[in-house]
Amino acid sequence: EVQLVESGGGLVQPGGSLRLSCAASGFTFSDHYMDWVRQAPGKGLEWVGRTRNKANSYTTEYAASVKGRFTISRDDSKNSLYLQMNSLKTEDTAVYYCARVSIMINSDAFDIWGQGTMVTVSS
Amino acid sequence: SYELTQPPSVSVSPGQTARITCSGDALPKQYAYWYQQKPGQAPVLVIYKDSERPSGIPERFSGSSSGTTVTLTISGVQAEDEADYYCQSADSSGTYKVFGGGTKLTVL
């Protein structure tokens, strides 16, 4: 079964750090770009960032709202995706989803999503 | 920053056709994708590359594109289609991804 499972969420104080993980199974993880998407309570979806695959040098992109504070990485040997979040702000409170980018040519579809992990930034 | 605009809500009776629009200046250049999200669940892809339907998605879901607007059409709406729907695309460079604000579909 194709699956993504996030972990690592929790309560953190403003200015603190947290590292989220996403464990992939059921597909060739190393072939895919992988993204993080978040959703604040009662709000819409917000793209956080992307890591490309080895063939594309593992390059990353970030939304302006998190650039310089968040870092996306991956370990293909462990089929895992990570999101290191530093200098957290209250507005970073959200459910964080990892999402697989479709391998179809010219397609940026997020075809598989994890169940999400909740991050709460509060004092 | 680039934005995609959706109506906040759409309401239809069972069996009718629901149309949800999404507008953005870069849509003539960039594909659009549509996701369905039910309460407490992760989003599910229902349309990709403007009008393609993934396997397992009912035929009543279709997508179309015209200029700076893309449209998700649900024909013969069923009660189970009640959900939030999000369009997604990218800015003109293709680098930065963006979601619309979401449309709550209510089945009366």
Image: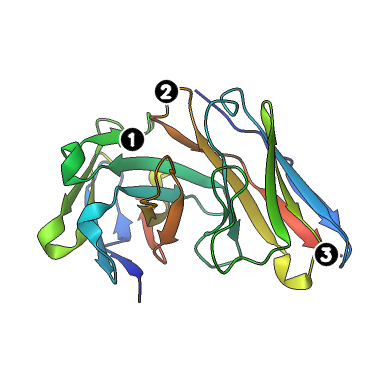
Left or right of A109, for residue A58: left
Residue, disc 3: B76
Residue lying at 24% horizontally and 30% vertically, measured from the top left:
A68
The crowding category of the residue bearing disc 2, from other C-alpha atoms within 10 Å (few below 14, some 14 to 19, many at least 20), is: few
Residue, disc 1: A66
Question: Among all residues in the image, which is located at the extreme front?
Answer: A105
Q: Residue B8's x, y, as percent?
A: 73, 44
- Amino acid carrying label 2: it is Ser
- Amino acid carrying label 1: it is Val
Q: Chain of mark 3?
A: B
Regarding mark 3 in the picture, which secondary structure is present there? loop
Q: Is residue B81 above or below residue B33?
A: below
- Amino acid carrying label 3: it is Gly
Render colour scheme: rainbow
The crowding category of the residue bearing disc 3, from other C-alpha atoms within 10 Å (few below 14, some 14 to 19, many at least 20), is: some
Q: Chain of mark 1?
A: A
Q: Nearer the viewer, residue B64 or B102?
A: B64
Q: Chain of mark 2?
A: B
